[in-house]
Image (cartoon, helix red, strand yellow):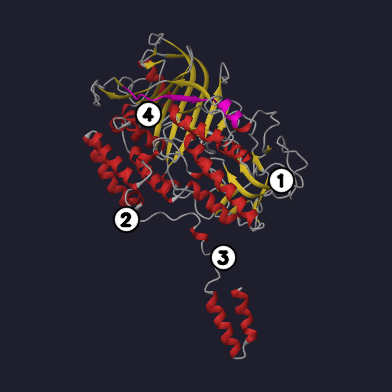
Amino acid sequence: PLTILLSAALLVTPTVHAFSTGIASTASTTVAYSRHHTITTTNNNNPLRSSLRHPLSSTASSSSDDTTDDTIYDIAILGSGPASCSLAALLSASPSSPKVVVLSKCADKRWVPNYGTWTEEWAALDEIYAARGVPGLMEKGVDTHWSDTDCFFGEDEGGTVRNEPEGNGKRTLGREYLRVSRVGLKEIFFGNDDDEERKFDVVREDVLGSAINTNIYEPRGAVSFGSDYTELTLKESEKKIRAKIVVDGTGAETSFTIRDGRENEGYQIAYGVECRVEGEGVTADKVGDYDRKKMTLFDYRSEAWRKSNGLVEQSVINTPTFNYVMPLSDDVIFFEETSLVANPAVSFQECKNRLTARLAAQGVTIKDVLEEEYCYIPMGGDVPRKGQRIIPIGAAAGVVHPSTGYQVARMLSSNVYFCDQIVEELARAGENGGDFDPDVAAARIIGRTWTPDSMRQRAFAVFGGDFLMKQNVMGLKGFFSGFFKLDEGMWAGFLAGWKNLPNNEYHDGWWPRVYFGIVFLTKLPPNVALDMAVSIVAYTLENGLDLIQSVTPLLGEPDTFDQSFQFRKNNGDVAAKWEAKEMMCACDRCEEAVEVEEVAA
């Protein structure tokens, strides 16, 4: 996922749901509020390890007396959402078995958001995770599966977008989709509450601190840095945890990681409801226009209900929303009225009112509300600032897709490389006899998430999000009508947009992105294609050459995260300094030459 998740009791949990493509997201201050009504629905020893004088048990609570200032872990992970727990599971299953601790007061809380993804991507991740000792994504990790996916873009039967009157043509994508089991996914990564087989420790407290500049935190002393460790302070007990590597999995609006450029972010807002329905539009085969045997990814139609339920027609046109639909059983269905990306954000009440009006126009009324979900997801902005020792993952690292809000599959994939680099850094420290530089290690670890190639690919998607944010309902219907006329690999690869995920080969280099852009322009309605061409020029003039760098080799590559450390331990031109020493000694100035010798050493 992004998130603070609140139940009726305002429970906070670090994970969030991403909506634009129905994909869940992990984050921290991205917020998903969940209210439960009539029914609460729940689907159904290492040579590299520093000595542990008082190791924490996997069920340690905040009141545990054995947490002392000299407890040292290999890795401390902040947060207990899917990003944090999947990384903990991967690290614990690795052959070197580093000592890992997860720090979160919400570690035992259920994961609330609805997670959806393409079956093809989930199957690929299942294979990758199973090979690394974390099996079960396609078995325990799946709740509901659909053999096909529908969309409505106001098209006529020939696939042309129509307005006044709006077309009711349905576009079937021919691609399988699934809802992730929230309960099953947590069991895979975290285990059961009483799971004694858990291979990592858990401290049920949050960590104190807020970054005010690079590696500077308030209040003073909350986070401090040693030469080969980082020391954290627990919020409630004020006890200390030390770790060689600290990972931030607390979400998009984390207090521990600085990401600049956030003033340029857009926000994905969604009101979701799991419910039972009634009305003349509810039949054995359909709920309104929605096929019970398929999931509906997008329904952008609005002409039939824009003026009802107290809505302002021009607002519906200018700040469009779509419906995302998951039929879960014969009598339960999940709807989510979603603003893809906007700044300022569309209000939750507006989304709820629009969903009510949309369903009423199809002869559908919500009878029983089983669960409500309010989700807020920041999209865009920059990658994390370079030089930070606390290393972000998932939404905290800016992994959320800047155009779509797609997150969970991207996060799970990126954590694989992230895990590999952590293990490599700890092994390097062991080989060097304990000479471990946590700053350089942090740069190399985050550099596995944000390679120059992945930053260029992200810049391409950031422009996409900026373009979508400007579109009214006609523009968005035209955009997605053209988008899904592309070959499946091209559109699927853009929605995923991450290494290790299927179809990424259509977007992982400058030439595939150029080809995608050219073909895409030919599929768009002329007015949308012209707007996009003009927007490319305007965006480049306003934001610099990142977009152009993503589609040409002529401007080089973005700087790597470890580049700033390349010369940090460089002793300069040692030969020149030794020459100065020898010449000074020849002039009877050997006492002064001692200083040169110390510098040259």
Q: Position of residue 381 (x, y in %)?
A: 43, 46
**Can you identify the residue that label 2 sits on?**
554
Mark 3 belongs to which amino acid? Lys
Q: CA distance from mark 3 to mark 4?
A: 53 Å
Determine whether 136 is above or below 282 in the image: below
The amino acid type, in three-letter code, at marker 2 is Leu
Image disc number at residue 321: 4
- Mark 1 and mark 4: Cα distance apart in space: 45 Å
| Quadrant of residue 525 within the rendered picture | top left
**Nearest to N terminus: mark 4 or mark 2:** 4
Q: Position of residue 78 (x, y in %)?
A: 61, 42
- Tell me which numbered mark, 1 or 3, is placed earlier along the sequence: 1
Across and down, in percent, residue 554 comes to 32, 55
Residue wearing tag 3 = 569
The disc placed on residue 238 is 1
User: Which region shows up in magenta?
Assistant: 171-188
On whether residue 593 falls in the magenta region, the answer is no
| Relative depth, front residue between 501 and 531 | 501
